[in-house]
């Protein structure tokens, strides 16, 4: 029978044989150690990033961005901005890879400013999604090289739909810019990557360009802070400019109200009956409490409750006839109660 031994880190040069009836004995064998790879133990890392290297990279990136700002053609940028401003349809953005993420972000920024905009998938657009394009729309194509095959294949199909095609590229004399109706050159000195390959500087200037144009459109359309807040009802800005006291207060029907002549026990029962955690009563309360009207902004109520000399947990809401109509709690009511929820700022 052939006997093969598998030893960790050791290999047998040749197999050796023992008769089936022979007693098992160990003999001197010619062994040699098998080469093993040296690997660092778990948790160890031989990489190191120095502060000087990091500082150098930040300065290099700053230099590359300054190159963009110094060489951007403002006449091209203005023409691009006016094309988006005068669009009667939807402004679509498209890109592949990292440029696609930037295109999606720019589109979402325009949407938040109240403009009709959307991102098109470079894959799905040629499989039915191009049907959304019309002659009133603008299609912005982002590509660093201007040689992205997916976008080049899309151009004749999008042109057949009658949309205005605009290329945003960073390489001079590229095919995509030549194929579109309008082109904006985004000057790129080089990528921050030591191999000049990883798209970090090119995507940064795409983002800077898109966001700057977005704010230009915002100013040109005279967008007010209130209009912007209306598009962000769940955000801090929206809550501070949209919600009024009447939207967050607890109505009079939900309030625990007692008369001055009520017994303490009755007042305690009323206090704990609806989870409001406050009690409106006569002499036992402050005769000159902080108050607010129902039409005031919710953020103003919050400021009053947090004002010196000490914060308060509740703010009475008084109407024009000086009648209590509600209370604004500083904190949201308990989840089990079906009441207005105080927006968190």
Image (tube, grey):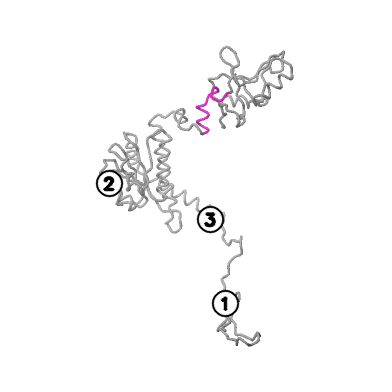
**On screen, residue 334 above or below 8:** above
**On screen, residue 173 above or below 339:** below
Mark 3 vs 2, N-terminal side: 3
In the rendering, which numbered label is found on residue 53? 3
Main structural element of the magenta stretch: helix, strand or loop? helix
The residue under the point 55% across, 23% down is 245
Looking at this rendering, what residue extends furthest in the right direction? 264
Helix, strand or loop at mark 3: helix
**Residue 100 x, y percent position in the rendering:** 40, 47
Q: Residues within 10 Å of mark 2 (few under 14, many from 20)?
A: some
Between circles 3 and 1, the one closer to the viewer is: 1
Mark 3 vs 1, N-terminal side: 1
> Pointer 3 and pointer 1: residues touching (CB < 8 Å)?
no
- Range of residues picked out in magenta: 235-249
How much space separates mark 2 and mark 1, taking CA atoms?
62 Å
Residue highlighted by disc 1: 34
């Amino acid at each position: 029978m052939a006997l093969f031994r598998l030893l960790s880190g050791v290999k047998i040069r040749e197999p050796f044989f023992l008769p089936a009836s022979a007693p098992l004995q160990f003999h001197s064998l010619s062994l040699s150690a098998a080469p093993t790879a040296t690997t660092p133990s778990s948790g160890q890392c031989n990489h190191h990033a120095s502060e000087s290297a990091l500082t150098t990279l930040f300065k290099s990136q700053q230099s590359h961005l300054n190159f963009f700002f110094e060489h951007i053609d403002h006449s091209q940028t203005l023409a691009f901005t006016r094309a988006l401003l005068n669009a009667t349809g939807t402004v679509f953005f498209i890109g592949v890879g990292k440029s696609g993420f930037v295109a999606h972000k720019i589109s979402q920024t325009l949407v938040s400013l109240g403009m009709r905009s959307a991102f098109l998938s470079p894959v799905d657009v040629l499989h039915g999604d191009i049907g959304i394009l019309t002659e009133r729309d603008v299609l912005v194509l982002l590509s660093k090289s201007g040689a992205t095959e997916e976008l080049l294949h899309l151009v004749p199909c999008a042109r057949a739909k009658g949309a205005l095609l605009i290329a945003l590229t960073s390489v001079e004399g590229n095919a995509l810019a030549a194929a579109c109706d309008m082109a904006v050159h985004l000057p790129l000195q080089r990528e921050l990557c030591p191999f000049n390959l990883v798209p970090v500087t090119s995507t940064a200037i795409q983002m800077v360009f898109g966001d700057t144009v977005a704010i230009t459109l915002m100013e040109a359309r005279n967008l007010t802070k209130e209009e912007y807040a209306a598009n962000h009802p769940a955000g801090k800005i929206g809550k501070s400019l949209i919600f009024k006291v009447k939207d967050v207060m607890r109505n009079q029907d939900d309030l625990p109200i007692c008369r001055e002549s009520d017994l303490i026990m009755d007042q305690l029962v009323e206090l704990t009956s609806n989870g409001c955690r406050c009690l409106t009563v006569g002499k036992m309360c402050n005769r000159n409490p902080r108050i607010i009207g129902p039409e005031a902004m919710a953020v103003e109520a919050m400021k009053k409750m947090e004002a010196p000399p000490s914060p308060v947990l509740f703010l009475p809401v008084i109407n024009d006839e000086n009648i209590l109509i509600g209370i604004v709690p500083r904190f949201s009511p308990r989840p089990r109660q079906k009441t207005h929820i105080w927006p968190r700022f």
